[in-house]
Amino acid sequence: MSDPDTLTESRATRLRRGLADAETEQVGAALLLVATVAAIAWANLGSGYDAFWHTDARVAVGEWSMGLDLYHLVNDALMAFFFFAVGLEVKRELTIGELTDRSRAIVPATAALAGLVVPALVFLLIARDSGQAHAWGVVISTDTAFLVGALAIIRPQHPSRLRVFLLTLAVVDDIGALSAIALFYTDELHVVPLLVALVALGLIALVRLMPSGRGPLYAVLSVVVWFGLHEAGVHATLAGVAVALLIPVAAPRQNDVERVVELTRAFRQSPNPAYAAAAGRQLRESISINERLQRSFAPYVAYVILPVFALANAGVVLDSETLRRSMSSSLFWGVVAGLVVGKLVGITGATLLAQRLRLGVLAPGLTIGRVAGGAALSGIGFTISLLIVGIAIDDPAAQDEARVGVLAASVLAFVLGAAVLRALDARRPVVPPGTVLLRPFDPRRDHYKGPTDAPLVLVEYGDFECPFCSRATGMVDEVIEHFGRDVVWVWRHLPLHQHHPHAELAARAYEAAHLQGRHFDYARLLWAHQDQLERLDLLRYADEIGLDLVRFEADLDADDVLRRVREDEDDADLMDVAATPTFFIGTERYDGQWDAPTLIAALDARRPTP
């Protein structure tokens, strides 16, 4: 049974969050680029670069001490925060995000897996005799920050669907890269500190049960996990991922949101510190700690941690000797070919295969050509690639060759991706998503009024709590009366959760009434009482029209009913439909006024010629 009090995130909220994330990532990518150029310049000005990053830093408690130079302090300690942020995103996507929907996630997930395996195979094919074949992990990861920044610079037409595809792909890519570090780049294991880390992780899993003080406990136990993994011989950055995967995440619950409204109203009526503190606390608690931490950490990761990492890792001496040695090195060419060719072939080929096998579909406006452009950009493998260079390769000269390969591959991947996307925009302009109806009228599935073979089809996406939809109902009745049997009207659900917290429950009630053949009668009561859509109100309306209440309530909470509503929502989401009411005439989106005379004229203009 589904939870009737759980709210899903609205498309408008996701859009605003996506724009904010994109701005952070674009600025972060710019800082990352500046730090990379600065590191290269610094390394080529003398010996100060290496001397600085090999400065010792030591932590001591009593007789115990741990020494790290600045380079390892950045790569082992500071980067744990980066992997913590990655882990939070992975946990969210797996729990309530894109990766919870198989049909939406299967294509980018399949592409991501191929984008991990094919580059590694290409690398091994070229660099197998270099003595550094075990460094195949250098070519498997995509740098998400640079990837998003590259999209912002190239500005392809209608990039939102490509961006969502690539970000979903990047989540799976991150999971694969982190797994590779844990499984293949751990040299020796010390059992006792590993057990300490595991016990601390077990305690972190229990912290969610604490009534208060969870933040300090998470912080202290996370430090214990980091030290435990470091002393155990496991790369300590994985502590960030392990902790993040145990941080709870959930969609906001309606009861919590309504409690915030009540406390805010109380503060407005009687402003005092107690109400202000209670409203602030309830507002904070209504959002899961996972999302709060993502918001808190994102700017520090993008603006501080990653630029400092680039400054510590991208400094390679680009003198004639290094370049000459790189040009003749199979390690260098293995890195370049793995990232540039492997990513392009792996991601594009897997996407095409997934489509041919009908494992999933691409979003409207996203073609295989644009996926190829995004796949080329995925060859920008900077952050984790440079990290694995330091982990997997011991020889300084070989490290320089691999770093030059990563830098060269990133530049080539950007140029290739930009060329593909701009060529496609010039020759095959994108049809904006939502101009064409994703799923045509299907009388076996849709709710409709009128003959199924009517020459005119009017499809409406609406929301039972939306006052504009209520007014549109009378307009639709006029349209049906005017055209008679020449029009069929189709109703599809689009509950706007952020603005209308009862809309999804009302849509499910409509579907439950449909299962007893009374959905149109029930809809009239929903329109008449838009300000009374609580659960008990919906049961009362069902009783008024004589529905079987036991069956109605069971259907109201049934997963099949919820899935039926979500299918309509998903269609709207894929078409970038985010307002109600939204109409389609036939399969074309209608963007004019929706008063009856104007809509009648639009339908007349699109009447098929006999």
Image (cartoon, rainbow, N blue to C red):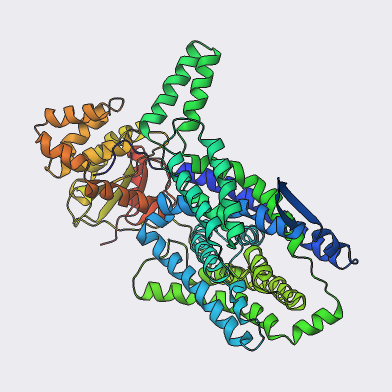
Question: Residue 210: x, y in percent?
Answer: 44, 34
Q: Is residue 47 left or right of residue 400?
A: right
Q: In terms of image quadrants, where is residue 44?
A: bottom right
Q: Is residue 327 left or right of residue 289?
A: right
- Tell me if residue 269 comes above or below residue 490 in the rendering: above
Q: Is residue 462 left or right of residue 68?
A: left
Question: Residue 250: x, y in percent?
Answer: 41, 42
- Does residue 434 appear anywhere in the picture? no
Q: Measuring 31% from the left and 52% from the top, which residue is drawn there? A: 567
Q: Is residue 137 left or right of residue 597?
A: right
Q: Measuring 35% from the left and 48% from the top, which residue is drawn there? A: 569
- Tell me if residue 403 comes above or below residue 2 in the rendering: below
427 or 413: nearer the viewer? 413
- Does residue 498 appear anywhere in the picture? yes
Q: Measuring 22% from the left and 35% from the top, which residue is drawn there? A: 523
Quarter of the image where the N terminus is located = top left
